[in-house]
Amino acid sequence: MRRLAARCATALLLSGVAACGGSDSGIDGLTVSGDFGKEPTVKVDSLDESSPKTHVLIEGSGSKLTKSSAAKIHLLLAKGTDGSTLQSTYSQGGQPQKVELAKAPSWIQSALDGVRVGSRVVYLTPLSKLNNGQGDSQHNLKASDDIVIVIDVMDTATPTLTEPQGKKVEPPKDAPTLVEKGGTITGFDFSDAPKADPTKFQAIPLVEGTGQAIKEGDQITANYVGSKWGSSKPFDNTYTRGQPAPFTIASPGVIKGWVKGLVGVKVGSRVMLVIPPDLGYGKQGNPQIKIGPHDTMVFLIDVLGID
């Protein structure tokens, strides 16, 4: 969840671990049954709540979450009118999703703050409390209709960083240097770099992080700036946009040079990748960002998290 809990809610609104089962939701008119970590069954009988209610159906014995925690969770949203499922992470490949409480909607913070890993939490709320007082015509829901949310807290997770963290490394003297304005990276300075486009791939560490190492196929969160070799004007820059971006480290998906340069790199790292055409956009180039078939690219990448 880099966001799934928010995505599930948005999709609805806009369109030591326990292993036992439980069924007493602690809320009149609502039954939630099934084993922890498995998709629950929701049954309702004349639900009518005007304010949110939270009940820990299965009490875990793992670490206690705080408002600054990150966790891996499964989540199911169901209609309070008939118990039918609206969204479920259990059925989306079966993988729990990451949520960071500090960045999550307030209802997730309220439901999970103080809860232990291994717990199943039932959260019941009128739709109006999630949707700015509105209903949801796509799902035939009125603002007053209840929404049942079941959350299984599978494990803790590492919060996404806001900047690199680790040991700084001195780059080669002929590497491009970074240009900053007001503390924000805006591009590269090639004054001391070779004039001709390099033809060999380079991965130049600038900060060596100590977090989890990237594996091929991982989805990461990163800040980056990319430029054609020798150009002072980047073709893309998340630093100036003020928002890191998610990437799946696999090809197709990202260019081969990113896979080659980032697999094995640890969270917290800052790395500069010099990527010749054969590991970039190849003979076709990329006209959209004005990269020709013979252009080498350079990227600065801050690895902030693995989702």
Image: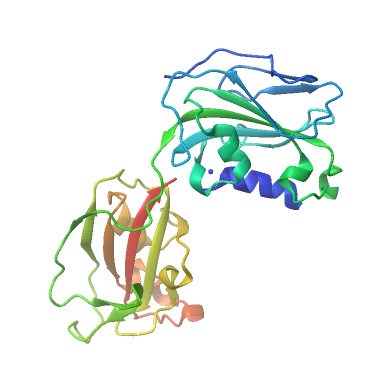
Which quadrant would residue 87 be assigned to in this image?
top right
Q: How many marks?
A: 0
Q: How is the image coloured?
A: rainbow
Q: Position of residue 194 (x, y in %)?
A: 19, 83
| In the image, residue 307 above or below residue 151 | below
For image coordinates 52% across by 29% down, the residue present is 153
Q: Nearer the viewer, residue 194 or 244?
A: 244
Q: Is residue 12 visible in the rendered structure shown here?
A: yes
Q: Position of residue 66 (x, y in %)?
A: 46, 35
| Quarter of the figure with the C terminus | top left
For image coordinates 46% across by 19% down, the residue present is 17
From the viewer's perspective, tell me whether residue 259 is left or right of residue 145: left
For image coordinates 13% across by 71% down, the residue present is 172
For image coordinates 45% across by 61% down, the residue present is 244
Q: Position of residue 215 (x, y in %)?
A: 35, 45
| In the image, residue 83 above or below residue 16 | below
Q: Is residue 95 visible in the rendered structure shown here?
A: no
Q: Nearer the viewer, residue 248 or 133?
A: 133
From the viewer's perspective, tell me whether residue 25 is left or right of residue 201: right
